[in-house]
Amino acid sequence: MDLSNLKPAEGSTKTRKRIGRGQGSGHGGTSTRGHKGAKSRSGYSRKIGFEGGQMPLQRRVPKFGFKNINRVDYKAINIDLLQQLAEKNNLSVIDVDVLREAGFISKNDRVKILGNGNITAKIEVKAHAFSKSAVSAIEAAQGTVVKL
């Protein structure tokens, strides 16, 4: 065996369909496009959502609601999670960077501290927003709240 008699494995290759090369090829005439109509022409492209003339879905379904472009989304963090974090890592200050390193928030998330659970650690909490119950719970534990 040498380079002159190498060939692909049996059945691994197919001859390509040569379209529009005369009747003898079996793919002449209409060139596998059927008869007449827009789909047989060159440059044909169907509109997105076209359903053959039937009223398309995006026109059948009614419009409602809107997207508020001024909406600010916050990632909710409860004070019991802050308590666990403070105990585990022996922290006195919890801010956005600490929460990011712990894996609770992503890079560009805004944080809102919520008052679910209870807190005993005296910690300084820095976040973008706080609920009233969270502020009262943190201050009741001699902690401080800093709004970013």
Image (cartoon, rainbow, N blue to C red):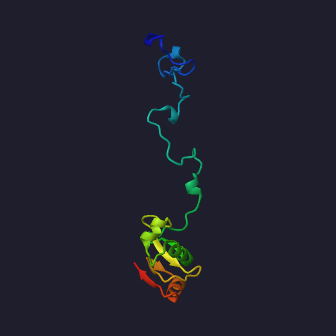
Q: Quadrant of residue 115?
A: bottom right
The image shows residue 20 at horizontal and vertical percentages of: 47, 21
The image shows residue 27 at horizontal and vertical percentages of: 53, 20
Q: Of residues 133 and 41, which is closer to you in this image?
A: 133
Q: How many marks?
A: 0
The image shows residue 101 at horizontal and vertical percentages of: 45, 65
State which quarter of the image contains the C terminus.
bottom left
The image shows residue 86 at horizontal and vertical percentages of: 50, 75
* Vertical relation: 9 (above or below) 89: above
Instruction: Residue at 55% x, 55% y: name it.
Output: 58
Question: In the displayed image of the protein, which residue is found farthest to the left?
Answer: 148
* Vertical relation: 18 (above or below) 45: above
Q: Quadrant of residue 64?
A: bottom right
Q: Of residues 24 and 110, which is closer to you in this image?
A: 110
Q: Of residues 141 and 129, which is closer to you in this image?
A: 141
* Vertical relation: 119 (above or below) 46: below
